[in-house]
Image: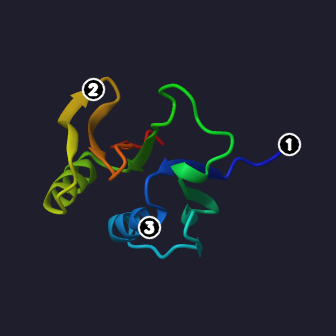
Amino acid sequence: MAKANLIVLYVTDPLASVEFYRKLLGKEPIVTFPTFASIELQDGFVLGLWGKAGVQPQPVGEGSRAELAFMVKGEEDVRVHYEEWRAMGLPIAQELTRMDFGPTFVALDPDGHRLRVCLDDE
């Protein structure tokens, strides 16, 4: 069976998105082209940033948005990320709140993709 190790977000400007995620994650891209870039998140799992204009086949409907979740170990870590991301000027789509699965919040990247921080239940 093939190993799932890549999530791709369709973005307006891959190079601008690289700068956003470089600053957010503190990581350098693995590859960078004008139409596509990627950054390893952890243990071989990679975030791809593909320019919307070059995606084939073109996405249809409302499915061109995604949510990328960042799992952290403690409730304090959720709060710390919330404060850091607010200080960085990220738009907050969901303020820090408690849901069934614990504390969480949602920020947005430059293309409106949702970036959720929540607890890792391990």
Secondary-structure class at tag 1: loop
Labels 1 & 2 near each other (Cβ < 8 A): no
Q: Position of residue 76 (x, y in %)?
A: 22, 51
Residue 100 located left or right of residue 61: left
Mark before the other along the chain sequence, 2 or 3: 3
Neighbour tally class for label 3: few under 14, some 14-19, many 20 plus, Cα within 10 Å: many
- Tag 2 residue: 99
Which colour assignment does the render follow? rainbow
- The N terminus appears in which quarter of the rendering? top right
52 sits left or right of 85 in the view: right
Can you tell which of label 1 and label 2 is closer to the viewer? 1
Q: Label 2 sits on what residue type?
A: Met
Q: Mark 1 and mark 3: span between their CA atoms?
A: 30 Å
Tag 2 or tag 1, which sits nearer the N-term?
1
Instruction: Please state which of residues 37 and 119 is positioned toward the viewer in this rendering.
Output: 37
> What's under tag 3, amino acid-wise?
Val
Q: Residues within 10 Å of mark 1 (few under 14, many from 20)?
A: few
63 and 25: which is toward the camera: 63
Question: Residue 35 in the image: x percent, y percent?
Answer: 57, 63
Marks 1/2: CA–CA distance? 35 Å
Q: Residue furthest front?
A: 53
Q: Position of residue 17 (x, y in %)?
A: 41, 62
- Point out the tag, 1 or 3, that comes first from the N-terminus: 1
Q: What residue sits 20% from the left and 51% below the top?
A: 82
Q: Residues within 10 Å of mark 2 (few under 14, many from 20)?
A: few
What mark, if any, has residue 18 been given in the picture?
Answer: 3
User: From mark 2 to mark 3, how far is it between C-alphas?
Assistant: 31 Å
Q: Callout 2: helix, strand or loop?
A: strand
Asked where in the image residue 30 lies, by quadrant, the reply is bottom right
Measured as percent of width and height from the top left, residue 81 is found at 25, 55
Q: Which residue is mark 1?
A: 1
Horizontal relation, residue 8 to residue 86: left or right: right
